[in-house]
Amino acid sequence: MRIIHLLVIGVLVFAAAYVYRIKMDSTDRTERVLRLRAQIRQERDAIAALHAEWAKLDSPQRLQGLVERHLPLKPLNANQYDQLKNLPDRPPSLVKPGDPDPIGSMLQTIEASTEAPTTTGSIPPQQQAQPQSEPQEAPQ
């Protein structure tokens, strides 16, 4: 009978320890959730402050004042617009029909020049082999 009592007491102690561990884990998790909620609240407050600052900086009255102070712009008048029929005639074409495309020929010239080896100013151009003559003395 004593063995059963000791066994039951041991099970009760083990159960109490297990329940205490579960309680401590849940307390830790609750504290962590509360810390995270506080952190989220702080971040939301910071975001709200940034939104308010952005709204202040993006205010049309403030921008209008900055434009008037820093840009030499004039107000737009409604009579500055015109109808399409009042546009000037198209300028005459400088390329006759059948002539090669001037832009295409420019592109071909550019491509040809990129294919050729280029030298920089730091490298002297190669001179053709000339017979070397004796150096002349400088007059004194």
Image: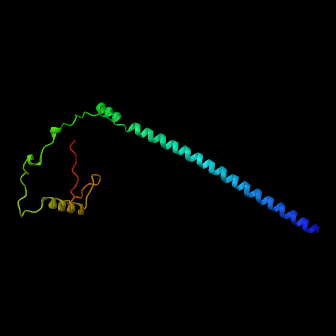
The residue positioned 24% from the left and 35% from the top of the image is 73
Would you say 126 lies left or right of 12 here? left
Quarter residue 79 falls in: top left
Give the image location of residue 75, x and y in percent: 22, 34
The residue positioned 24% from the left and 63% from the top of the image is 115
Residue 128 at least partly seen:
no
Quarter residue 100 falls in: bottom left
The residue positioned 48% from the left and 42% from the top of the image is 48
Image position of 6 with respect to 86: above or below: below
Would you say 7 lies left or right of 118 here? right
Residue 120 at least partly seen:
yes
Seen from the viewer's position, the closer of residues 111 and 38 is 38
Would you say 12 lies left or right of 40 here? right
On-image quarter of the C terminus: top left
Give the image location of residue 45, x and y in percent: 52, 42
Seen from the viewer's position, the closer of residues 93 and 119 is 93
Give the image location of residue 31, x and y in percent: 66, 49
